[in-house]
Amino acid sequence: MADGVVDLLREMAAPRAAAASGVRRVLVGLVGRAIQASRTPAMHEREATRHGLDCTYVLIDFDRLGLADDRLGDVVAAAAECGFDGLNVTHPFKQAAIGHVDALAPEAEAIGAINTIVFGEAGRTGHNTDSWGFSESFREGLPGVRLDRVVQFGAGGAGAAVACALMGLGVDALAIVDSDTARADQLVRRMAPRFAGRIELARDAASALAAADGIVNATPVGMAKYPGMSFDARHLTPRHWVAEIVYFPEETELLRCARALGCRTLAGAGMAIFQAVRAFELFTGRTADRRAMASHFEAAA
């Protein structure tokens, strides 16, 4: 493959792979940008050890490796060729990765984005564990909050998964805001047939926030690489609840502002843990322990 992507992935996986003997080996990776702070490798490797498996989980960081976005297909193909069991996919590739799989699981097809690819006899199958992960985290972390009107910032791959989760959680009216209005409109149009009248495009963020019970940040804004907030902090009030999907740093500027006002908040760590629970099960066929995975996440800090 051009530029030695196959050799690159083999080299990344070799140190741990060579050490594995006498036990089932699991080889997976995370594809994305600015992912060096990810705790996902630790979660998967430690949970695998608990199950008696030898797991190697590598970070395929396009920033660190100097790869252009259009090399995504090469990386996915190289991983399959190198014997990977699967890949997790994160920003900014959750939608683009759909073009590099052979089939989509039902939830991934409905959402229009994937964060997990499983390599098997049937080829490459794309899954979405983000939506389930956000739902489980929300139920645990924000029970009983008002769901009449919610504003979601972000209409990318993670945004699509979160929007689907919010609809499933019972939100009556969801307003989507994105710096790319066309992308937000596309998400609303795709989801409208399933959730008629409950999801809409919001062109005026301030007005949407003024009417909202809750706010969800489903953008990468807040990450170390993209500091700040996805909206003007002046529009945040104590009556809002706030949910974040970014987890590194663990406390984003949005969460700091919300907590200072006394808002109920949901950190991004919960979604990160629960999506990993489901992805681990897809990669290994073993049932993950939620509490153990949460402990692995904390230990990785």
Image (tube, grey):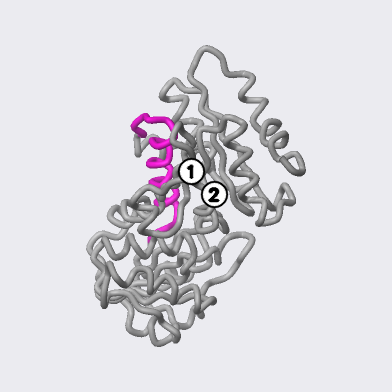
For mark 1, give the secondary structure: strand
Q: Amino acid at mark 1?
A: Ile
Mark earlier in primary sequence (2, 1): 2
Residue 54, placed above or below residue 167: above
| Residue that mark 2 sits on | 100
Magenta-highlighted residues: 266-288
Q: Are marks 2 and 1 in contact (CB under 8 Å)?
A: yes
| Mark 2, other Cα within 10 Å: few <14 / some 14–19 / many ≥20 | some
Q: Nearer the viewer, residue 102 or 230?
A: 102
Q: Nearer the viewer, residue 204 or 273?
A: 204
Residue at x 65%, y 45% (from the top left corner): 74
Residue at x 56%, y 46% (from the top left corner): 38
Locate residue 215, reporting x and y percent.
Answer: 38, 71
Locate residue 62, reporting x and y percent.
Answer: 67, 50
Q: Which label was assigned to residue 16?
A: none
Residue 145, placed above or below residue 84: below
Residue at x 50%, y 58% (from the top left corner): 95
Main SS, magenta region, reads: helix
**Quadrant of the drawing holding the C terminus:** top right
The magenta stretch spans residue 185: no
Left or right, 14 with respect to 253, comes to right
Q: Which label was assigned to residue 117?
A: 1
Left or right, 31 with respect to 12, comes to left
**Quadrant of the drawing holding the N terminus:** top right
Task: Identify the image quadrant of residue 199.
Answer: bottom left
Locate residue 134, reporting x and y percent.
Answer: 37, 55
Residue at x 32%, y 55% (from the top left corner): 135
For mark 2, give the secondary structure: helix
Spatial CA distance of label 2 from label 1 is 9 Å
Left or right, 197 with respect to 19, comes to left
Task: Identify the image quadrant of residue 112.
Answer: bottom left
Q: Nearer the viewer, residue 257 or 72?
A: 72
